Amino acid sequence: MRTTGPARRGLSRALVRAPILAYRCGLGVLLGDRFVLLTHVGRTTGRPRHVVLEVVGRGEAPGSYLVASGYGGRAQWLRNVLAHPEVSYQVGRRRRDGWAYPLPSPESGRRLADYAQRHPRTAAALMAMVGHDIDGSPAAYERLGADAEHGVPLVLLSDTPLPPADAP
């Protein structure tokens, strides 16, 4: 299934939303530690929203995960967590309350390239599915991860508050 935008209707939406149902039924453990159920707040409605995302890496703190926005700045979940960074997330049976922090562009690019080296076929398939035609080189993934608007920026989910950017 190839799409150039988020699934909005019919069968493609049902397929994309099926893992959310699995988590709601207590079957999130079947998805292992490669997927995370992210619960965030809608930026205009203020209502809880849910999305299941692939884990592309781990953060420095225990229980922190990196997820990618395949649709860049167009992804509704990304726009929501930028407006309201307080989130809940679940991997397997473990649920945590925390925050969503967009990674700085250079780090986002490096981490996406690292993911692509560890999972080359999965990364290539995911990039093709969301409409990114790249040559598969680490440099191409790095450029794609560093482009916050049209690329695939990464977001850190953590239950540990990060220090302010201007802290020593």
Image (cartoon, rainbow, N blue to C red):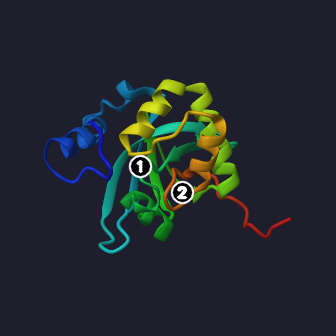
Classify mark 2: residues with Cα within 10 Å, few (<14), some (14-19) or many (20+). many
Task: Point out the image quarter for the C terminus.
Answer: bottom right
Residue pointed to by mark 1: 38
**Label 2 vs label 1: CA separation?**
10 Å
Look at 32% across and 53% down and name the residue there. 5
Residue pointed to by mark 2: 100
Dividing the picture into quarters, in which one does residue 29 lie? top left
Which residue is outermost to the left? 10
Residue 58 visible in the snapshot: no
Provide the secondary structure element on which disc 1 rests.
strand
21 is higher (above) or lower (below) than 50: above
From the viewer's perspective, tell me whether residue 96 is left or right of residue 77: right
Residue 97: x percent and y percent?
50, 52
Look at 70% across and 42% down and name the residue there. 60
Residue 105: x percent and y percent?
65, 57
Provide the secondary structure element on which disc 2 rests.
strand
15 is higher (above) or lower (below) than 29: below
33 is higher (above) or lower (below) than 107: above
From the viewer's perspective, tell me whether residue 43 is left or right of residue 65: left
Which of 132 and 71 lies nearest the eye of the viewer? 132
Look at 31% across and 52% down and name the residue there. 6
Classify mark 1: residues with Cα within 10 Å, few (<14), some (14-19) or many (20+). many
Dividing the picture into quarters, in which one does residue 19 lie? top left
Which of 119 and 97 lies nearest the eye of the viewer? 119
Residue 92: x percent and y percent?
43, 32
Which residue is outermost to the right? 168
Please state which amino acid type lies under the numbered disc 2: Ala
**Do tag 2 and tag 1 residues touch (Cβ < 8 Å)?**
yes
Which of 85 and 56 lies nearest the eye of the viewer? 56
Number of numbered discs present? 2
Please state which amino acid type lies under the numbered disc 1: Leu
Nearer the N terminus, badge 2 or badge 1? Answer: 1
